[in-house]
Image (tube, grey):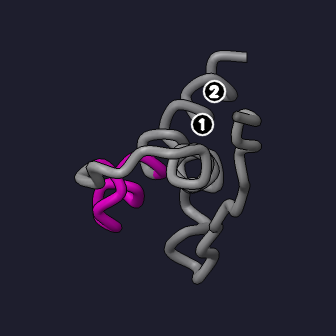
Amino acid sequence: MRIGGVIVVVWLVIGLIATYQRGYFGQSDVNCAALGTVLVTIVVGPLNYLGVNPRIECEVPQPSP
């Protein structure tokens, strides 16, 4: 059980490093697409270094006037 927890933590840390290297934390424009891309990049973790480049596209409905 402990080895599984260590593997998950290492996986997520690698994902955070990949997210930082891609410059996603420096973006001033935060929307659902940017947030989704950051979260997916963290979760995908080491697969980022194998060429996986997740992108999230979403549109938030605008309120009617």
Percent position of residue 65, x then y: 70, 34
Check the image and report above or below for 51 versus 5.
Answer: below
| Residue found 62% across the figure and 23% down from its top | 5
Determine which quarter of the picture holds residue 57.
Answer: bottom right
Q: Secondary structure at mark 2?
A: helix
Q: Amino acid at mark 2?
A: Ile
The label number, if any, that marks residue 58 in the structure image: none
**Depth order, front residue of 42/50:** 42
Q: Residue furthest top?
A: 1
Determine which quarter of the picture holds residue 3.
Answer: top right
Q: Is residue 33 magenta?
A: no
Percent position of residue 4, x then y: 69, 28
Percent position of residue 53, x then y: 59, 74
Assess whether mark 1 and mark 2 are in contact (beta carbons under 8 angstroms): yes
Which residue is disc 2 drawn over?
3
Q: Amino acid at mark 1?
A: Ile
Which residue is disc 1 drawn over?
7
Give the Cα distance between marks 2 and 1: 6 Å
**Depth order, front residue of 22/7:** 22
**Depth order, front residue of 4/63:** 63
| Residue found 70% across the figure and 41% down from its top | 62
| Residue found 73% across the figure and 17% down from its top | 1
**The magenta stretch spans which residues?**
15-25
* Disc 1: CA contacts within 10 A as few (<14), some (14-19) or many (>=20): few
Q: Secondary structure at mark 1?
A: helix
